[in-house]
Image (cartoon, coloured by chain):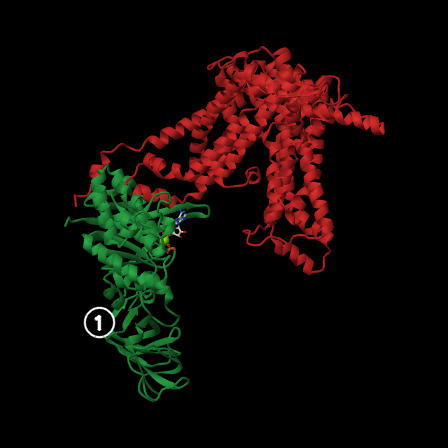
Chain colours: A red, B green
Amino acid sequence: MTAPASPAEALRRKVDWLPYAVGALTVFVLFAFLLFPIAKTILSSFVKNGQELEIANATLTNFAKFFTSASYQRAFVHSLVVGGVSTLVATLLALPAAFALSRVAMPFRNLLMSLSVIPLVSPPFIGAYSWVTLLGKSGIVTHYLNTWFGIEMPSIYGGFGVIVALSLSFFPYVLLIVQGALAAADPFIEECAFVMGASRWRVLRTITFPLVLPSIAAGAIIVFIKALGNFGVPSILGGEYYVLPTLIYFQVHGYFNLNGASAIALVNVLLTLLAILVLVRVNKRRAYVTVTGGTRRSAQLTGLGARIFANTYCWGLLALGLLPHMIVIYSSFAEQWAGTVFPTAYGLANYVNVLANVRAPFTNSIILACAATAMCIVFGTLAAYTSVRKRFFGKWALDLTIMLPFILPGIVTGVAYLTTFNSGLIVLSGSGAILVLAYFVRRLAYVFRTVSAAVGQVDTKLEEASSICGATWWWTMRKITFPLVSPGIISGAILVFATLISEMSVTILLYSAKWKTISVAIYEYIISDDLMNASAIGSITILATLLLVFLSSRIIGKTMAEMFR
Amino acid sequence: MPSHTLQLRDLTKTFEAEQGAVTAVDSVSFDIVDDEFFTMLGPSGCGKTTTLRMIAGLESVTSGTIAFDGQDFTKFSTFQRNIGMVFQSYALFPHMTVFENTAYGLRIRQMGDDEIKVRVSRILELLGLSALAHRNPPELSGGQQQRVSIARALVYDPGMLLLDEPLANLDAKLRVQMREEIRRIQKELGIMSIYVTHDQEEAMSVSDRVAVFNHGKLIQVGAPHEVYASPNSLFVADFIGRANFFPARTALRNGQGARVALGRGSELEMPLSRPLPADEGALLDAGFDAMIVVRPEHLGLAPAGTPGIPCSVRRILFLGNYTRYMVACADARREVFVDMARRVPGIAEGDQASLIVHHQDAILFSGAGR
Ligand SMILES: Nc1ncnc2c1ncn2[C@@H]1O[C@H](COP(=O)(O)OP(=O)(O)OP(=O)(O)O)[C@@H](O)[C@H]1O
Ligand SMILES: [Mg+2]
C-alpha cells in the first residue's frame, strides 16, 4: 500500500473558508432585503410625505390620522371586524369537522382532508368574485331565494361578502391543526375520564377541549393574521368598505403617499403582533398536552347517528369551501352570460382566447416565480442548515428574521419595498427584480421550514464521518448533506413556486406594465367585469397549483393535509 | 511498518453548559506508539468520548496539547488529520452502496477508479464483505453495518483508528466475535488504535493497554493484567473485576508492610502497603485508616473454628469451572465474594465459616499520615 497522506500533506489543501463566506452572504441578503426595508418603513412612517428621513422631520402626523380621519377610523374598525368575525366563523365551522374527522369512523377521511387544502393553496381572491355570481344582485342563489321564498339577500359587496369569502377560504387552517392535535392526543387520558364515570359530553367539555385549546388558538391566530392582511378579497368584494390593506393600496395608488401607507402598515402589523401575544399566552399552558407516538388511535365513534352527522357535516362544509373554485371553473366554460341567471352558451372560447392573447402574464409569473424559488432554495437551505447545525450567538435572531414575513401581510412587504427601493442606494421599482426579491423574502420561510426538518433528520455523525474521511465542508455538503435533504428542498421549492404563480397582495403594489403577472391579469379582467376570461385564467392557475402541491407532497411522502399543519 | 506516536499532554475540555462550566476532561496525558491497541475505559460520563473527539478534531481543545509524530495536531482540521473513526451508530451513508461507502475516503483523495477498485475489494475481503459490495446499508444486519464502517475507516491507510463503543449496538455473542476480529485486523494492518468502551471485560480482552478514567481524570494506565493485579486506587480496584473491601486499622508498620486489625479485632499481616490516593481519603470509614482489597480468587473459606475471619455463608453458586460463595462478614464493606476452584466439603448455605485472606495477593491501601 502507498504511504498514507500525512497531515502535513493535507495542510496544503485549501483552508476551509467557504462556510464563513456563505454565512456572510446569507446574513447580507437577509439584512439588505428583509430587515433594512422593514426598518426603513418603520422610520418613514414617522415622517411626512415628501420629506427627507431625518430626525428633525420626525412627526406623528401619519398616525394622528387614525384619530382625525373618519376613513382611517372606519378602515381600522372594519379590519378588526373582518379579522375577528372571519376568525370566529372559520373556527366555529372547523371545530365540529375536526372532531368528526378524528373521532368518528369515516370513509375517505384522507381524501376529504387533502381536498380541504385547496382553499389554502389557491389565493382567495380568485374565488372571491364567485360569491357575486352566487349571492350578488343578480346572482344564482339570490335569484332563487327571491323567486321561491321572497327573501332579500343583503348586498354581497361590503363586510358581509368579505367575511363570507375569507372565513370559507381560511377555515381549513383550524380544521387541519385541530384535527392533527385530536388525532395525536393520548387516548388514555380520555379513557381514564370515562372509567371514572364521566359522560361523553362531560369528557369533551372538561378533557378533550382544554387539551386541544392551544391548537385551536394556533389555528385561529393564523386565520386572523391571514384575514387581517388579505388585500385581494376586500379589493374585489369590499366596494366602499375599506379595510387597512385596501386603505394602504388607496394611499399608494391614489396619492402616492408612501409615508402614510407605512404608518397604516405599521398599525396593521401591530394588530397582528397583538394576536400573536395572545397565542403565546394561551400556549403557556401547553405544558400539559401529552401526545403519544401514535401507537394507538383513540376510540372511534361508530354509531349510525354520529356517522351520518359527521359525513353530512364534513362533506357539506368542504363543498361550501370549494364552491368558489367550482364556480370559477364553471364560469370559465361560459361563452355567453349576460342578464341571465345561467349562461346561455358554453364552450372553450375563453380558454382559446386566454391562451392566445394572455401569454405575457403567464410567462412573467413563471419567470418571476422561478427566480424567486431559486433564491429561496439557495438561501433557505443555507439558513436552515446553519440554524439547525451550528451554535452561534444570535441564532434566535436568524430564526426570527426568517419567520418575520409570515406575520407581515403581503401588502406591507409591498409598501416596505416601495419605500426602500424607489430611491436611494438600490433603485429597483418597476423592475422584475423587485418582484423577485419581494417574493423571495415572503416565501423564504417555506423552504427554511421544510429543509430544517430534513436536516434535523440527518444524523450529525454522518457529516462527522465524512470529515473524518478527509472531506472538506463543501465536499460533505455536496456528497452527503444535500443528497439526503434534497427531498425536503424540492418539496419546499415546489410549494414556494406553486403559491407564487398567483401571488396577489405584494404584486399589486410592485408590478409594472412590463411585469404584469397572472394575478394582475385576473384582477384586471374582474375589475372590467370580464368574468369569463378571468375564470379561465383562474381555473388554469388553480389546477396547476393543485397539481404542484400534490407533487410536492408525494416527494416528501406526506399527505397534502400534513403539509399545512 | 511506519512508526507513529501520539502524545496527549494535560488535555482539558470544559463545556459551557447552562448550569455552569462542566470539566469533561481534566488534564489527561498519555502516549501511544506504533500499532498499539489502546483502550479508554470508565463509567458513563467520565469523558472518554470527549477525549476521543478531541483527538479527532470534532471537539475543540480547551487547553493542553495533542501531538502526532511530533506535530501539533490541534492546528489541523478534522479533515486534514488523516484518521479513521468507527461510530457506535455506524454512521453509514444511507444513499451509497457498501462499495461507495468504503470508497468514499479514496474518492476524496482523488484516487483513480482502478486503484479504488483494488483497494476497496481488498479491504472488503479482509472483513468478509465481498458478497455485499452492492447492497445498501439499510439492507445489512448490525454486525455487517459495523464491518462496513470499519472498512470505510481503514481503506485509506489512516494514521490511527478511533473506535467509540463500536460494539455497543450488537448482541452479546456477536460482540465477542467482532472484538476478536477488530483486534486481528488491527494487528494485521499494524494501525494504531484507540478504543472506547465502558465494558471492562471487553477492554481487558482486546487491549494492549487500558486507561481507566473517572470524572474526567485519567486514573491509571497499564496492561490489562497489571491494572487488574495492582490497581492504584480503590476506584480502579472496584471498577476492574470484582473486589472485596475490608476497612482496617494499622497496628504496627514493618518495612513495606503492616500489621492491621479489622473491625472485630482479627489481626492480619500485610506484606505490602501502598498509599491511598489523596482524593480517596474520604472513602475510609470513621475509625479506620486503611483498606484491604482482595480479589474473590484470593480468598479462601474453611469450616467455622479454623483461624480466620468469622462469617456466614449465604449462597453457593456452582459456576462450572469454579464455585462462588456469597458470604456475609461484619468486617467487610459489603457482601463478600469468594471464588474457589473446588467446593469446600462440610460448608452449606446458612453455615458459619472462616474467611482466609491470602495476604501475599491482597493489597493494603493506607490513608494519609501513615
Ligand atoms: N456538548 C456538550 N455540552 C456540555 N456537556 C457535555 C457535552 N458533551 C459531553 N458533555 C459532558 O461531558 C461529560 C463527559 O461526556 P462524554 O460523552 O465524554 O462521556 P463518556 O465517557 O463518553 O460517557 P458514555 O460512556 O456514557 O458514552 C459528561 O458529563 C457530559 O455530560
Ligand atoms: Mg461515550
Q: How many marks?
A: 1
Q: Nearer the viewer, residue A242 or B54?
A: A242
Q: Nearer the viewer, residue A74 or B102?
A: B102
What residue type is disc 1 on? Gln
Extreme residue toward the right, this view: A150
Q: Nearer the viewer, residue A185 or B82?
A: A185
Is residue B317 shown to the viewer in this render? Answer: yes
Q: Residue at x 23, y 65 (%)?
A: B226
Q: Is residue A375 above or below residue B90?
A: above
Q: Quadrant of residue A22?
A: top left
Q: Nearer the viewer, residue A505 or A363?
A: A363
Residue A23 placement (x, y as % from top left): 40, 30
Q: Is residue A230 left or right of residue B353?
A: right
Residue on which the image places disc 1? B256
Residue B93 placement (x, y as % from top left): 35, 44
Residue B32 placement (x, y as % from top left): 22, 53
Q: Is residue A299 above or below residue A281?
A: below
Is residue B250 shown to the viewer in this render? Answer: no
Q: Quadrant of the C terminus of chain B?
A: bottom left
Q: Quadrant of residue A336?
A: top right
Q: Is residue A78 left or right of residue B340?
A: right
